[in-house]
Image (tube, grey):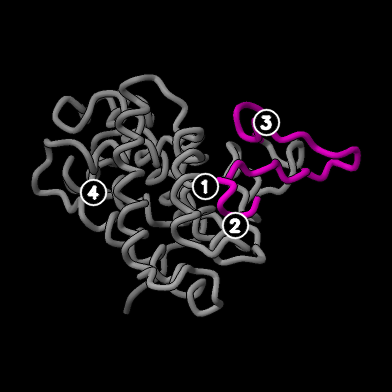
Amino acid sequence: MRTERPPVKQDRAVRTRQAILVAAATVFEECGYDAAKLSDIVNIAKVTKGALYFHFGSKEALAQAVIDAQNQGQPEALPQDYKAQEFLDMGMIFCHQLRHDVLMRASARLTLDRAGQTLDKAAPYQAWIALHTEVLAEAKRRGELLPGVDPATPSQLIVGAYAGLNTMSHTLGLDMDRQVSELYAHVMPSVVVPAVAIRLDTAPGRGARALFGGRGTHECREGCAVGVAPDEDGAVTRPDINLPEALGA
């Protein structure tokens, strides 16, 4: 007869696994796959190698768990009037997570790492493309997209652009949040109708606003709502969106 593990032990096991995962992310982000050492991971996590192997059978399994974390437990964004806004919010929230979440940064690095050839690096891209396409398809049903726009096409291009901008921003020391903000400001007018385009918030700091609302209402203190001044009651005034005059702005 199977016996259930006591809740206290289950909680401890969950905490231990998470500690190992975060420690692994710290090492993978800094060193990459090949140079990462399990000894460094157990030291940071303050666990034994036996505990590590209990939860993850190998370095490869641990790296795969870090990669998979990119599509698990995504934060819930605030509902928006336009599905097109929710579409671009996904990318801006991703930038916000890269700033604050080592698991996201390590996952992004591992998917671009040429080492670890047996790892499944395609799954995060496929999941992101599918999610973006689903949201944009709903935007199309609501009449938010320009005629002839296939939701799958901008979804693939945007997800691919994330990867490229993440690499370039890291290499050149650029602010990825601002880079992705510029990406959406240039791309969205080619995807959505003008009446929707002029109402989209693509400004830097959008990721934090999509999650928490106005500046000062969430725990982030640096770089999360740049350029967006709160009103006296704490509400955020939507910044002016710089769109071409051809859109009627």
Callout 1–callout 3 Cβ contact below 8 Å: no
Q: Position of residue 39 (x, y in %)?
A: 23, 26
Disc 2 marks a residue whose amino acid type is: Ala
Q: Residues within 10 Å of mark 2 (few under 14, many from 20)?
A: some
Q: Is residue 132 above or below residue 186?
A: below
- Magenta residues (range): 220-249
- The residue at the point 61 percent across, 65 percent down is 82
Which residue is denoted by mark 2 in the rendering? 77
Q: Amino acid at mark 3?
A: Gly
Task: Indicate which disc, 1 or 4, sits on the residue closer to the N terminus.
Answer: 4
Choose the circle earlier in sequence order: 2 or 4. 4
Residue type for callout 4: Gln
CA gap, disc 2 and disc 4: 26 Å
Structural distance between the alpha carbons of marks 3 and 4: 37 Å
Residue at point 31%, 45% (across, down): 66
The type of residue carrying mark 1 is: Ile
Q: Which residue is mark 3?
A: 227
Q: Which residue is mark 1?
A: 93
